[in-house]
Image (cartoon, grey):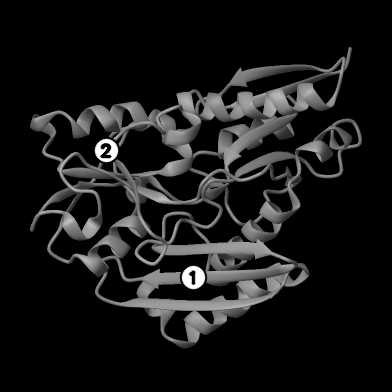
Amino acid sequence: MPKLIIGSRRSQLAQTQSNLVRRQLLAAWSGLQVDIELIDTRGDLNRIDPLPQIGGKGLFTLELEEALRERRIDLAVHSLKDLPVEDSPGLTVVAVPERAPTSDLLVCRTADRVEALPPGAVVGTSSLRRAAQLLALRPDLKIKDIRGNVDTRLRKLDDPAQGYDAILLAQAGLTRLGHADLTHIHPIPAQVMLPAPGQGALGVQGRANDPDTGPYFAPLEHAPTRAAVTAERAFLAGLGGGCSIPVGALATVEAGQLSLRGVVASPDGRRVIRVAGSGAVSAAQEIGYQLANEAISQGAQALLS
């Protein structure tokens, strides 16, 4: 019986996402055995320091990539927004399944939108991108770092001793974990906050040109999602890459056309550069790089340095 081993981080969300891919593989291939091996990453082992301080490329991926190269696993399932834009040597994104919702969420029991937060409210996020866009709209807000898995962050919000009035989370994670029915989660419009490039999408990473495993991944691929995230990640790559910099991007695909919006902000939100463009789906990568160049011509590099 043929067998594939999925490498997964230990978090509940990571295991949920790996099981989603496992079920898709089992549905596509009768007689295939698919197991999941749990692997600790540097980002998981350090739950204290703010992500930008310990960050850099591969914070949640390096250990999984080593396991792939050593053939201890056959594929790794990542939140695509955590995966560096450049392929790691010998590896590639072998499939991008259909995307979940892309929005960021305001999680708050006293306000249903960012504009309604009280003056000076304390908002928890470990994302420079979210903080910068939040401060661009509401410079009076106080940003407080928050770490931990989704359930931990939800508990921290409800613990008065933690001092949070609201927190920001990705809608995709809450949806996949079964929290979509919470009454105090409020999607933030893209006009207010663009998601991270690739947010809501999964990246199935495998060995490049591996004839033993490659054929199994084709049924996982969702072409419109692949095109959208290709444009978004090209925008990020054109700006220098890195999943911890204050860059947002969102592409949509309709009737063979791809539309992309991008944002680059200073960490304090005082300067924001917004760009937008569209073109044929087949030119997804070129659209991303073109908008990155437009942002650079408007001073984006100074904001990111």
Question: Looking at the picture, does residue 253 appear above or below residue 238?
Answer: above
In the image, taking residue 246 as reference, residue 83 lies left or right, namely right
In 3D space, how far apart are the residues under numbered discs 1 and 2 (Cα atoms)?
A: 28 Å
Residue 149 seen in render: no
In the image, taking residue 226 as reference, residue 249 lies left or right, namely left
Residue at the extreme right: 211
Question: Looking at the picture, does residue 39 appear above or below residue 96?
Answer: above
Name the residue: 58% across, 63% down.
Answer: 251
Question: Looking at the picture, does residue 135 appear above or below residue 60?
Answer: below
Q: Which residue is mark 1?
A: 262
Name the residue: 33% across, 32% down.
Answer: 182
Q: Quadrant of the C terminus?
A: bottom left
Q: Badge 2: how crowded within 10 Å, few (<14), some, or many (20+)?
A: some
For badge 1, the amino acid type reads Gly
Q: Which residue is mark 2?
A: 184
**Residue 215: x, y in percent?**
88, 36
Residue at the extreme bottom: 297
**Residue 39: x, y in percent?**
55, 24
